[in-house]
């Protein structure tokens, strides 16, 4: 959605400029400093946590304040800085160490019924252990209180766009930095856009490169010394685990887009991307359980046979189109479609429609609907379906076959006349959005976002 909004914003600017009369002087690309602030809150739930091998709670909350500042540089340049944090609390991530909890799982009656729905987690296992740091009750259906339960992702993305004197050529360059406790990323990009046909046609080419690195945090039972120092009991636990020798991940993305104003009421755009990823594409946190290995439990928690293993390379090929149609002064139709395929066997299809409803000069409401469906990756296996002899395997349901629906509604107030201003700060718009998402495998989330856009003289 972020990239679609940016493309639409630039496209609208080009359309307006195509209708302007010739001026006797060069007008600045951006007249004032522009500031956008956004705060979003996200709440998710589901029952297919990859950290616990495809079963268990996926409960997660995330709060993300972000600010984007655009600064005019001379008459032809715009410097943009996008910075923010994302603070999350994740029940599934906390179960990297499910034995770090302060209360007994057996006391949580709400999850007793959920446990009984999963017969393979029987306490009758001959290899079940029942003593973990003096506490009982480890379960994939309940979050632990460990350090991995919460984290903060911070990002800082500066970029610069330079327009030619005739505004028919735009050069851009960008940097990207982000970090969380077990992952960091550095990226850079560059691109060029050309306008033709009296600014009714735009052709753009962009390149993005990301160089990422893991600090692998493996499930607690796979770490050296875990049994010696933490657990006593009966039985012998074995696994096929070996630490990853590669911790880096590189991503290279090339994008080509074409936008065209067909009539004074219709605009269309097309894009095609080519993405290559190499390096550690597996997540060290995510457990896998094999069909040909005996189960081993501590309380209700099954210990991992291994972590997911995925190929060193992945190639992605998305293509898509967007069409905006002006129906009347009240209604505008926006539509979007995308086809996706990759070298892991995933194919996906997205269709989205949004219908902004304009009320006077200042108000707009925009309901939207989005449908997505995909096939499963070649390496996806539900719990205890992969074999130890397989080369690649994952139980991450993001790589399973599913379909999803997303409903949304937003409301925006635009201060067209610039009446809401204080000193040198003038409010341009306020926008509130709500999204509800459902996936066929049970994952769901709700997201609310509040944004302000204002200028500084």
Image (cartoon, rainbow, N blue to C red):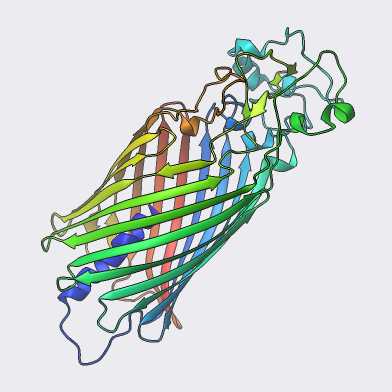
Residue lying at 53% horizontally and 46% vertically, measured from the top left: 278
User: At x 39% / y 56%, what residue is drawn?
Assistant: 254
Where is residue 331? Give x, y as percent. Answer: 18, 54
| Residue in the foreground of this view, choosing between 35 and 271 | 271
Quadrant of res 89? top right
Q: Is residue 40 left or right of residue 20?
A: right
**What's the residue at 52%, 56% (across, down)?**
210
Question: From this viewpoint, which residue is outermost toward the bottom?
Answer: 24
Q: Tell me where residue 31 appears, x and y as whole percent.
A: 36, 82
- Which is nearer the eye, 74 or 70? 74
Q: Is residue 52 above or below residue 332?
A: above
Q: Position of residue 397 (x, y in %)?
A: 50, 30
Q: Is residue 311 left or right of residue 403?
A: right
89 or 50, nearer to the observer: 50
Q: Tell me if residue 26 comes above or below residue 296 in the rendering.
A: below
- Check the image and report above or below for 232 versus 162: above
Q: Position of residue 432 (x, y in %)?
A: 40, 55
Q: How many numbered marks are there?
A: 0
Q: In which quadrant will I find the C terminus? A: bottom left
């Amino acid at each position: 959605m972020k990239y679609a909004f940016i493309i639409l914003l630039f496209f609208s600017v080009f359309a307006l400029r195509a209708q302007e009369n010739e001026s006797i002087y060069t007008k600045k690309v951006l007249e004032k400093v522009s500031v956008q602030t956004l705060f979003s809150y996200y709440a998710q739930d589901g029952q297919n946590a990859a950290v616990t091998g495809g079963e268990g709670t996926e409960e997660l909350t995330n709060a993300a304040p972000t600010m984007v500042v655009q600064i005019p540089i001379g008459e032809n340049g715009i410097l943009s800085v996008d910075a923010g944090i994302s603070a999350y609390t994740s029940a599934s991530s906390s179960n990297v160490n499910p034995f770090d909890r302060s209360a007994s799982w057996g006391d949580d009656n709400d999850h007793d019924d959920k446990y009984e729905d999963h017969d393979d987690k029987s306490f009758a296992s001959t290899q079940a252990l029942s003593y973990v740091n003096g506490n009982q009750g480890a379960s994939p259906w309940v979050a632990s209180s460990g350090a991995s339960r919460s984290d903060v992702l911070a990002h800082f993305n500066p970029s610069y766009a330079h327009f030619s004197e005739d505004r028919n050529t735009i050069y851009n360059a960008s940097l990207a930095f982000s970090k969380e406790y077990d992952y960091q990323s550095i990226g850079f990009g560059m691109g060029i856009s050309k306008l033709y046909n009296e600014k009714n046609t735009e052709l753009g080419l962009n390149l993005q490169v990301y160089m990422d690195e893991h600090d692998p945090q493996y499930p607690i039972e796979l770490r050296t010394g875990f049994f010696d120092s933490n657990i006593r009991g009966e039985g012998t636990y074995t696994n096929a685990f070996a630490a990853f020798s590669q911790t880096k991940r590189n991503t290279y993305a090339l994008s080509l887009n074409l936008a065209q104003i067909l009539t004074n009421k219709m605009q269309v755009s097309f894009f095609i991307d080519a993405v290559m990823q190499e390096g550690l594409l597996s997540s060290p946190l995510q457990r896998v359980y094999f069909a040909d290995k005996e189960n081993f439990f501590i309380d209700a928690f099954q210990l991992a046979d291994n972590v997911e293993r995925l190929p060193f390379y992945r190639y992605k090929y998305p293509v898509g189109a967007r069409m905006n149609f002006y129906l009347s002064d009240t209604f505008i139709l926006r539509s979007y479609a995308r086809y996706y395929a990759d070298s892991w066997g995933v194919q996906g299809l997205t269709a989205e429609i949004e219908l902004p409803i304009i009320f006077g000069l200042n108000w707009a409401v925009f309901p939207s609907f989005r449908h997505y469906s995909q096939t499963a990756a070649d390496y996806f296996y539900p719990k205890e379906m992969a074999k130890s002899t397989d080369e690649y395997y994952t139980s991450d349901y993001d790589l399973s076959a599913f379909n999803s629906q997303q409903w949304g509604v937003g409301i925006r107030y635009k201060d067209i006349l610039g009446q809401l201003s204080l000193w040198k700060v003038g409010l341009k718009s306020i926008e509130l959005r709500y999204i509800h998402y459902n996936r066929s495998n049970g994952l769901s989330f709700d997201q609310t976002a509040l944004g302000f856009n204002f200028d500084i003289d």
